[in-house]
Image (tube, grey):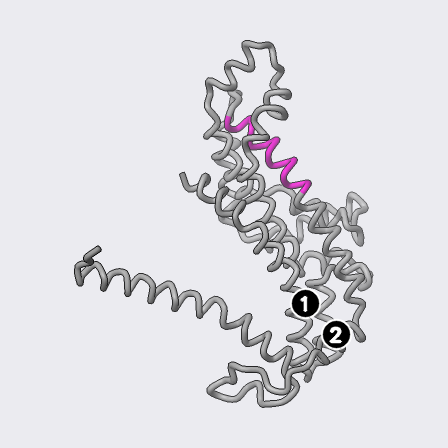
Amino acid sequence: MNLRPAHVLRLFLHYLVLAVIAIVCVFPFWWTFVVAISTKGNMFEFPPTFWPQAVSLENFSEVFRVIPMWNFLKNSILITAATVIGKLVICSLAAYPLSRMAFRGKKLVFGIILATMVLPSEVNFLVNFVSMTKLGLVDTYTGVVLPNIVTAVSILLLKQAFDEVPQDLLDAARVDGALEWVIFYRIVLPLMTPWLATVGILTAVEAWNEYIWPSIIIAKPEDFPLSAGVLYLRGTYGSSTRVIAAGTMLTVAPILVAFLFTQRFFMRGMDGAVK
């Protein structure tokens, strides 16, 4: 196949831009990994060192020795799993009527939900903390999970997914006498697997990396999730950047591995959302 010079140039520029973006995204992870497994060398020299020196897992073993990593990991798994399940249930129940049911004020409700997207999550910290205090949920995992199980982005994505379901399929189910709950649970939800996976992955990443809200609502350090618990390395090893880097890699690794195994569901869901 003969390619014109102009087309070859466009392809070259296209892949060059993609390569630059990939390098910019990967470099912080690579540099942190190099620092974590190195035991010698100047970490802050310029130009920086891109290859590890005196490779060792000593920094990782030091993290496990100083802080209860396994306990923090267990807490993160519980909080993340509860947040993902809660968000999928609540947001799908909210998105379905906004997409497929007719009721007075539907556009107003949907508009109010979308309006909350312009507010940063930090704005809600004070209100959420007061609410959790009134409900007696301070220093509990429920207090960590509850404010995060409903977001406008998740409702929007799932609403767009419900909009893609053929109306004839729902009408046929209603003609056969199926109740609305049966239609939602037995017919519509099985078709939503890619979109539900997308929302679940996004939620898992967000819940796993959340550290401000858990550190506010939880008082006992042993109940902290991994993202908040690793911050103790800053106090214990304020001058040991290598140990802090090792703790950071241990925090990022589980969710990164999980995403690598589930990215095909994520891409399918995002493709459907864009359409």
Q: Is residue 226 above or below residue 154?
A: below
Mark 2 nearby-residue class (10 Å; few <14, some 14–19, many ≥20): many
**Dot label at residue 250:** 1
Q: Residue furthest front?
A: 1
Q: Eyeballing the image, is 171 above or below 63?
A: above
Residue range corresponding to the magenta coloring: 85-99
Is-magenta flag for residue 96?
A: yes
**Horizontal and vertical percent for residue 183?**
59, 21
Tag 1: amino acid: Leu
Q: Mark 2 = which residue?
A: 63
**Above-or-below relation of 150 to 220:** above
SS category of the residue bearing label 1: helix
The residue closer to the viewer here, 91 or 68, is 68
Query: In the image, is residue 240 above or below residue 216?
Result: below
* Quadrant position of the C terminus in the picture: top left
Q: Which residue: 68% across, 81% down?
A: 56
Q: Residue at x 72, y 49 (%)?
A: 130
Q: Earlier in the sequence, mark 1 or mark 2?
A: 2
* Residue 180 picture location, percent across and down: 60, 18
In the depicted view, which residue is nearer to us: 258 or 145?
258
Kind of residue indicated by mark 2: Val
Q: Does residue 6 belong to the magenta stretch?
A: no
Judged by its main secondary structure, the magenta piece is helix
Q: Say whether marks 1 and 2 touch (CB < 8 Å).
A: yes
Q: Residue at x 39, y 68 (%)?
A: 20
Relative to residue 216, is residue 3 drawn left or right?
left
Left/right of residue 4 with respect to residue 240 in the rendered view: left
Q: Residues within 10 Å of mark 1 (few under 14, many from 20)?
A: many
Q: Secondary structure at mark 2?
A: helix
